[in-house]
Amino acid sequence: MSLKHTNSQGTPIEDTKTALPTYLSYLATLTKSNDTYLQDVVVQSYVSLLRSSYARTTFWSTGDEGLRPLINILETAAGGSGNGSNYGNVSNLGNPIQGGVSLQLLYHVLLVTWELTFEEAIAEEIHP
């Protein structure tokens, strides 16, 4: 799905118009898991999916459903108000940083954020 969800003109393939939002919604539920390994796999999936403009705008349109779990991870890593209980026991995912979030997971969350900024409208909303 990450490689071919638009045709040669850049418009979404018809099946993608229904499959991608459903898949992103499913991934968002997995991101809320207490399993940091699962969270990292999901965020890596986002990294692969967000290579196209259509996927980035579709992800952004999910609003809090897709973004809130990623924001929680960032807040936890920063020692803020994220749901830190998800990150109490991290092992073999790299060295945990503040809040127990692994550097690998943090990197992938920041990579997703960076990919979203490829869309001018999204970048303006992220940084008004």
Image (cartoon, grey):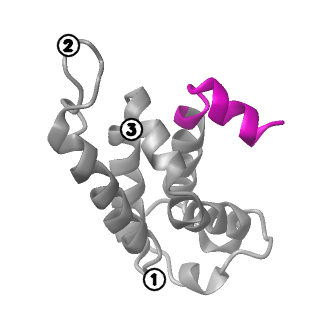
The image quadrant that residue 96 belongs to is bottom right
The image quadrant that residue 41 belongs to is bottom left
Q: Which mark is residue 8?
A: 2
On the question of residue 92 being in view, the answer is no
- Comparing labels 1 and 2, the label whose residue is closer to the camera: 2
Part of the protein shown in magenta:
115-128
Q: Amino acid at mark 1?
A: Asn
Q: Left or right: where does residue 119 sit relative to residue 22?
A: right
The one nearer the camera, 114 or 13, is 13
Q: Amino acid at mark 2?
A: Ser
Q: Earlier in the sequence, mark 3 or mark 2?
A: 2
Q: Is 20 within the magenta? A: no
Residue at 43% over, 44% down: 58
Q: Amino acid at mark 3?
A: Ala
Give above or below for 85 relative to 12. below
Q: Residues within 10 Å of mark 1 (few under 14, many from 20)?
A: some
SS of the residue under disc 3: helix
Which residue extends farthest top?
9
Q: Which mark is residue 69?
A: none
Q: Is 124 within the magenta? A: yes
Q: Earlier in the sequence, mark 1 or mark 2?
A: 2
